Image (spheres, helix red, strand yellow):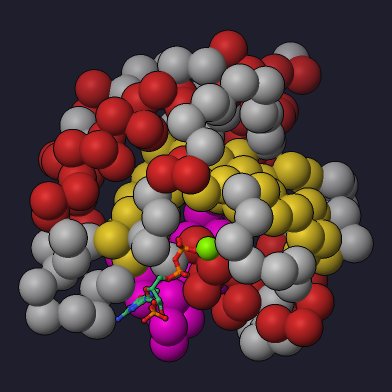
Amino acid sequence: MSVMRKAIFPNRNFKILMLGLDNAGKTTVLYKLLNGSPTTLPTMGIDIETVQLTRNVSFTIYDVGRQPEIGALWADGLIFVIDSSDQSLFEEARRVLWQTLSSHDMKGVPVVVFANKQDLPQAVSPLEVTNSLRLSQVHHRQWYVQGTSATDGSGLTKGMRKLRRLVREFQSMNRS
Ligand code: G3D
Ligand code: MG
């Protein structure tokens, strides 16, 4: 995993925002990305946690359930984590995602959805998550849905690499 951290965004400073409802698995994702070194993390229970994932990648976690105002958050790339095993929360997750994407600071910013908890028997597929979030109606930005299991780390590398690619494409488009 630490090799993965270095490989992700080698050249520039990036700000990644990770958000999702409470209990989606955000902190677990971050732990895995940090190579299981929870002592480097700030105390749990605060609304916004920011860590330096690598020298040039800052990672901000946002528990939307705890703080409804999205406000002036911005990022180069967005990760939206959803608990694929709890369909009763899909509508709320969709509302939060769409509200976030409608923010001016998020204009065009690519989003990778982590359809998390794929290891649980009641989890629905990434495709079903895609449909529930109505991602086919998302225009003017790149998006991708990655099935993940944050507890064992599966899918995280793939999802982060995809995000890197989309962020690079977005930035090169904006420069030209
Ligand atoms: P949050 O930071 O988004 O609020 P957490 O979510 O990372 O705190 O995770 C909430 C709970 O879901 C935790 O369980 C965590 O272990 C579990 N979880 C996270 N990702 C996965 C996953 O991929 N699979 C499974 N099976 N569980 C996951 P606890 O019991 O510690 O509350
Ligand atoms: Mg958390």
Q: Which residues are magenta?
A: 146-164
In the rendered view, does 33 fall on the left or right side of 144? right
Q: Residue at x 35, y 25 (%)?
A: 98
The quarter of the picture where the C terminus appears is top right
* Residue at image coords 77%, 19%: 175
176 drawn magenta: no
Q: Is residue 155 magenta?
A: yes
- Identify the residue shown where x is 82% and y is 61%: 52
Residue pictured at 20% horizontal, 32% vertical: 134
Left-right relation of 158 to 5: left
> Considering depth in this image, is 129 or 62 the residue closer to the camera?
62
Q: Is residue 33 above or below residue 95?
A: below
Question: In which quarter of the view is residue 142 placed?
Answer: top left
- Is residue 103 depicted above or below 49 in this figure? above
Residue 16 locus on image (x, y percent) = 66, 46
| Among the 4 quarters of the image, the one containing residue 144 | top left
Position in image of residue 34 (x %, y %)? 70, 77
- Image spot of residue 36 (x, y percent): 65, 87
Relative depth, front residue between 30 and 127: 30
